[in-house]
Image: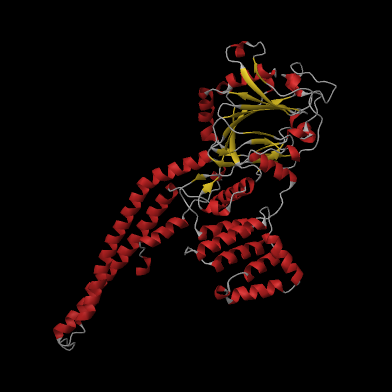
Amino acid sequence: MIGFIINESVLAIMLLSFSVTDLKEIYTSMRTIKVHMADTRQLLKGELSTLRSYVKNQKAALTNLKESINNLQHLSEEAKHPNFDILHPLNAYRFIRNHSVIYENTVKTIITETKQLEEKLVSNTRELIPKIPSLNKTEYEGVIDGILRLQGTYDLNVNDIVEGNFGGIPSGLTISAKECGEIIKVLFKDPFNRPFYGSEWVKQATRMIQNGDRSTTVATIYTLAANAMLAINKREEAALLYAMIPKDQRGRYHKIMVKALWTQTEDSNRRQVYRRMNTIFTKADLKNRHDRLCNGQSIESLLPNRHTPRRHLVCRIVDNGSPILRVQPIKLEELSLDPYVAIFHDIGSEHEISAVRECAEPKLQRSMVNSLLQGSVLDRGRTSQNMFIFDDSKYIKFARRIEAATGLNYSGFEKFQIANYGVGGHYYCHHDFFSAEYAKKTFDDDNRIATCMLYLTDVEKGGATVFPDIGVSVFPRKGRAIFWYNMYRNGTVHPLTRHAACPVLVGEKWVGNLWIRRNAQTFAKPCSLDRLELDWNWL
């Protein structure tokens, strides 16, 4: 019966067993992370007090049970006394009385109190656990994936990450060798991550252990990496990792695995595997251009020669004779003429930005991408949360200013999409226009002629919008908007409008997207027969 008694440590284990496992992917939105953190702190203030009360009551019940058990022990001690003679009538009476009436009452008390304690504890925990926020394991893997994306994009040193230094901005926290092992496990089992990064993390964890970190062992680090490689059928890499475990920590299991995995591998292949896992990889051309722009570097030397636009880029004040812009004209900065890309400075007011964010924050959902065959699907190339504002009054003034500045008809504006990015949140290279087949099937051959993206926050580090085919990068600044045409004047799509949202290194990024459809612009922006007519004539 005593086995049913649950102490404080066991109660903690029960809490874990009741963990909520709903997949929320909070790592894809900093706002959602902040809300979850605030909710957790608030709830734990009250619920931890309740838990302590449960434990206190449990201890009191345990004290009563101990007293009952001591009473049973005392009953048996009397019969062991040297002067106790069972042949004496009074002694026989006492023995029978103790082991019938008192014994029965004491045992009944123990059984009853234990049962009540168990039932009360289960009832209390079932009532309490749903109130305590918890996260799915995939949330942890998602945030690790985000950190690895930051490492790859911004060429972060592993030691800097471990020390909490992201692009020169410290966090005040450090990562232990055991946590490095958890990162290694995610990294190695993901075929999208390069083996070189995994090797760097293994070396870092090993150095930390050698320097006194006792959170794990070198053998555990290499075993985690090897098992992860084995899980994706990288047998030779797994064998190499098992073989690299120090001899004084190598067990029988490790030796068996090395022998089994190396059996079919030639010596030359072993050397190739070692070189492959320890050689700095060369980024693909698009990825290289993307990353350099994200870091604010020029890529002019990496771009193919293209025809030179017929005039220079300019900055100018635009009002287009519109009453809306007469008092506050648009401060326009041209970044590219082909395709046409420009910045509208200070076009979003503080009040408008606050209003749309307030509307969006409670309604954010995981961002999806459109697929012709599958519809809306999750994609690791887009890690953020978004929502659409269907109430035009929340952003109508901003939209009308865009209409006045561009001459594009407001009736062709899609609903305002608000997006918030999470840890390493990004949207890799993509076009805003639809494929011809998708547009024809889904939107009656209508397509997105232009895009206007408004920054709703400043970002401390990273989070630029980049165009890797034309060498343009724009870093977030609250109230600033980027505008570009996705199509040529004759209505065909412009392939060089491919763009990306770089991962947010440090800070919080909010943006608002207004996509503008072509069919509503028949008279506002009529088609031209010249496909190469430059888009800057449109403004």
Residue in the image at 36% along x and 60% along y: 8
Residue 453: quarter of image: top right
Q: Quadrant of the C terminus?
A: top right
Left or right of residue 403: residue 215: left
- Residue 265: tell me if it is visible: no
Residue 262 percent coordinates (x, y): 70, 72
522 relative to 207, above or below: above
Left or right of residue 335: residue 387: left
Q: Which is more toward the observer, 479 or 305?
A: 305
Q: Quadrant of the N terminus?
A: bottom left
38 relative to 104, above or below: above
Residue 326: quarter of image: top right
The colour scheme is: secondary structure
Q: Which residue is most to the right?
A: 529
Residue in the image at 74% along x and 16% along y: 524
Residue 484 percent coordinates (x, y): 70, 27
Residue 325: quarter of image: top right
Q: Which is more toward the observer, 217 or 437?
A: 217
Q: Which is more toward the observer, 396 or 87?
A: 396
Residue 333 percent coordinates (x, y): 66, 24
